[in-house]
Image (cartoon, helix red, strand yellow):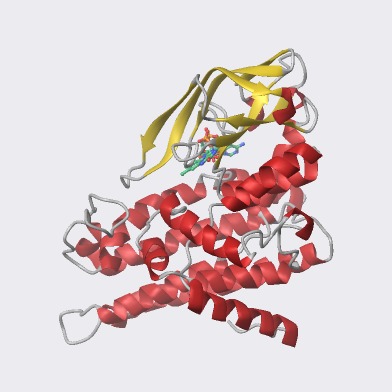
């Protein structure tokens, strides 16, 4: 889809394109293409972060005073779009997009000075400790307890589905500091050092065979009071701010369009055994066209939200709409790939990512090999960051006023 950019915006887009053409390493692009997971492995993601950081573009959503670009919202969108169209990996959002805005909005000057540069440099790799066994959609019921002991908190409990906790050295965490108050009012937001006794990280393997998520156990884990963000009991408001950022101001559509183009190109390259290509199947083409139209409509909604943000308004609850639409479309596209390849798309590879010395000898094309892992992995889209049902409730209540 062509958007009419102003001359300045178009010049910026061209600058980003030239940068990507010159500086996106082939190994990083191939690693991203071979990863069926939402986040790439840290060796791929951090290599790309370092390239962007050297150019001063890693904090592309950050204010200038904290080491970011200070770009306007449309430029951030253009940047993400061009990165997606160039096949760059998804950036690991946990530090850059989730905890960083919390720190610069609610943190102390010391927290800002210490933590923000370490996110950009890659010294700190963050994970998100919100969900617990029994507390996901009903997050305010969380039980992990933090008891104040002088100038420190002592934590006991467990967090679950913690993405990349096995790679992380820090976890931002919601904990219960008051058991008497109303459940939302008893929650605080802490920054936890994972490199200490009392932390254990147990892997959870997905049905696609990937190790992305974990259960994290906390046993008498110590957090200095100066690593609490905001006031005691303010954790729930901070979490709502963070979740709105997690769902909102997003740029899903360009990546979905890119994946549709990639899928169509792959289908054209696969013979149907009758002198044509798999892409010739009219029913499949109909589904492809429908998905492409949905992706283009989603891009319009995303740009509308960007224009609201540019006017100084918060992303708001309509970001639940983009999360819902993008998640459904992600799954539709991955189903299209499985449809396309049939039995050839059902092979499950034994190694991730699918390159390097340990990769299995391919039987079919790489796209075919990735169809099943991608399909299985993307089941999670309608769960993480708030399930489809939870997003629908938010839309019904806060957007439609039902
Ligand atoms: C791949 C993956 C990565 C994740 N990464 C992280 C992470 O890094 N950090 C983190 O903290 N969490 C993470 N999560 C957890 C995620 O946020 C939760 O799984 C999600 O919020 C749902 O919670 P739950 O699993 O406890 O399911 P439940 O809340 O128990 O929901 C079960 C079912 O009931 C439905 N339901 C629940 N409440 C309602 C309602 N009020 N109305 C209608 N239907 C309802 C849900 O939609 C769902 O279908 C991740 C999850 C996945 C799958």
Q: Residue furthest right?
A: 312
Percent from the top left, x then y, of residue 389? 57, 45
Quarter of the image for residue 314 reads: bottom right
Q: Residue at x 57, y 60 (%)?
A: 325
Q: Is residue 191 visible?
A: yes
Q: Where is residue 23 drawn, in percent x and y? A: 50, 73
Q: How many marks?
A: 0
Please tell me whether residue 165 is drawn above or below residue 313 in the rendered image: above
Q: Nearer the viewer, residue 201 or 26?
A: 26
- Give residue 188's quadrant in the image: top right
Percent from the top left, x then y, of residue 362? 18, 63
Residue at horizontal 35%, vertical 45%? 210
Residue 393 placed where, x, y %? Answer: 65, 45
Q: Is residue 351 above or below residue 265?
A: above
Q: Quadrant of the N terminus?
A: bottom right
Q: Is residue 147 above or below residue 240?
A: above
Which residue is nearer to you in this view: 398 or 40? 40
368 with respect to 48 (left or right): left
Is any part of residue 400 visible from this angle?
Answer: no
In depth, the one of 261 and 361 nearer the eye is 361
């Amino acid at each position: 889809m062509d958007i009419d950019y102003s001359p300045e915006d178009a010049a910026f887009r061209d600058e980003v394109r030239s940068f990507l053409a010159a500086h996106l390493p082939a190994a990083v692009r191939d690693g991203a293409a071979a990863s069926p997971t939402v986040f790439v492995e840290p060796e791929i993601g951090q290599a790309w972060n370092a390239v962007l950081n050297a150019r001063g573009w890693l904090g592309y959503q950050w204010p200038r005073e904290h080491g970011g670009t200070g770009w306007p919202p449309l430029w951030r969108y253009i940047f993400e779009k061009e990165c997606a169209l160039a096949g760059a990996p998804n950036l690991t959002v946990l530090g850059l997009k989730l905890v960083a805005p919390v720190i610069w909005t609610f943190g102390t000057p010391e927290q800002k000075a210490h933590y923000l540069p370490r996110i950009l440099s890659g010294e700190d790799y963050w994970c998100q400790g919100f969900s617990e066994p029994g507390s996901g959609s009903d997050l305010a019921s969380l039980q992990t307890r933090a008891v104040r002991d002088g100038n420190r908190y002592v934590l006991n409990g467990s967090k679950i589905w913690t993405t990349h906790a096995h790679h992380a050295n820090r976890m931002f965490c919601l904990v219960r500091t008051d058991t008497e108050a109303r459940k939302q009012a008893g929650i605080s937001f802490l920054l936890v050092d994972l490199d200490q006794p009392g932390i254990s990280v147990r892997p959870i393997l997905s049905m696609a065979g990937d190790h992305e998520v974990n259960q994290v156990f906390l046993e008498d884990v110590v957090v200095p009071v100066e690593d609490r963000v905001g006031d005691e009991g303010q954790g729930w408001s901070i979490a709502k701010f963070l979740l709105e950022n997690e769902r909102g101001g997003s740029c899903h559509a360009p990546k979905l369009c890119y994946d549709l183009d990639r899928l169509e190109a792959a289908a054209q390259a696969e013979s149907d055994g009758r002198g044509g290509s798999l892409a010739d199947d009219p029913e499949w083409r109909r589904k492809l066209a429908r998905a492409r139209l949905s992706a283009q409509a989603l891009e319009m909604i995303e740009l509308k939200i960007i224009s609201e943000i540019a006017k100084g308004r918060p992303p708001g609850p309509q970001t639940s709409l983009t999360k819902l639409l993008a998640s459904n479309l992600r799954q539709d596209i991955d189903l299209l790939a499985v449809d396309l390849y049939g039995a050839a798309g059902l092979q499950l590879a034994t190694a991730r990512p699918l390159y390097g010395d340990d990769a299995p000898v391919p039987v079919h094309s790489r796209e075919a090999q990735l169809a099943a892992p991608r399909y299985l992995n993307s089941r999670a889209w309608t769960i993480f960051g708030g399930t489809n049902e939870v997003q629908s409730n938010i839309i019904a209540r806060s957007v439609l006023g039902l």
